[in-house]
Amino acid sequence: MDSRQLIARNLKLIRLAKRLSQEALALKADVDRTYVSGLERCIHNPSVDILDKLAGVLSVKTIEFFAEENARPAPPPLPRGRRKKAQ
C-alpha cells in the first residue's frame, strides 16, 4: 500500500472513530469539504501542513496517518443525509 492510500484509509478511520463528518472536519481544519473527500479517495496529495491541521483537529499525531496496521476497529458509519430542521 502506498503512502497516499495509507493516509486515505487512516484519515477516514480516525474521522469516523471521532464521529465527525467530512464537512465538520473540513470546517474545523479550515479546508474545503471536497478536499477532505478527495484525500479519502486518493485523489489529492496532502501537504505536511494539511496533515498537521487535520491531525490537530482529530487530536492525533500526524504519524498515525501513516500507520500500516491501524489498531482501531472499524467504526460504525455515520448517519446519512441532512439533519432535520428543528421546528
Image (tube, rainbow, N blue to C red):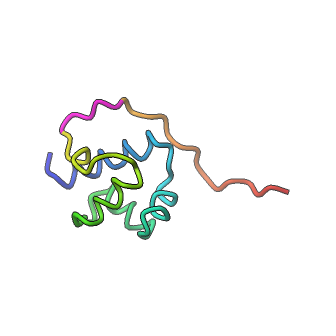
Q: Which residue is painted at 20% across and 46% down in the image?
A: 66
Q: Position of residue 38 (x, y in %)?
A: 34, 63
Relative depth, front residue between 79 and 68: 68
Q: Residue at x 37, y 42 (%)?
A: 13
Q: Is residue 57 above or below residue 47?
A: above
> Residue 25: x and y, percent?
46, 57
The image quadrant that residue 1 belongs to is: top left
For the point 14% across and 50% down, which residue is it? 2
Q: Which residues are magenta?
A: 68-72
Task: Residue 56: give x, y in percent of width and height.
Answer: 36, 55
> Is residue 18 left or right of 66 when viewed as pictured?
right
71 in magenta? yes
Query: Where is 54 relative to 65, above or below?
Result: below
Residue visible at 22% across and 51% down in the picture? 5
Q: Percent from the top left, x then y, of residue 86?
A: 80, 55
Residue positioned most to the left = 2
Give the number of callouts: 0
Residue 3 colored in magenta in the image: no
Left or right of 4? Residue 79 is: right
Which of the two residues, 51 or 43, is positioned nearer the viewer here?
A: 51
Horizontally, residue 28 falls left or right of residue 69, namely right
Q: Quadrant of the C terminus?
A: bottom right
- What secondary structure do most residues of the magenta stretch adopt? loop
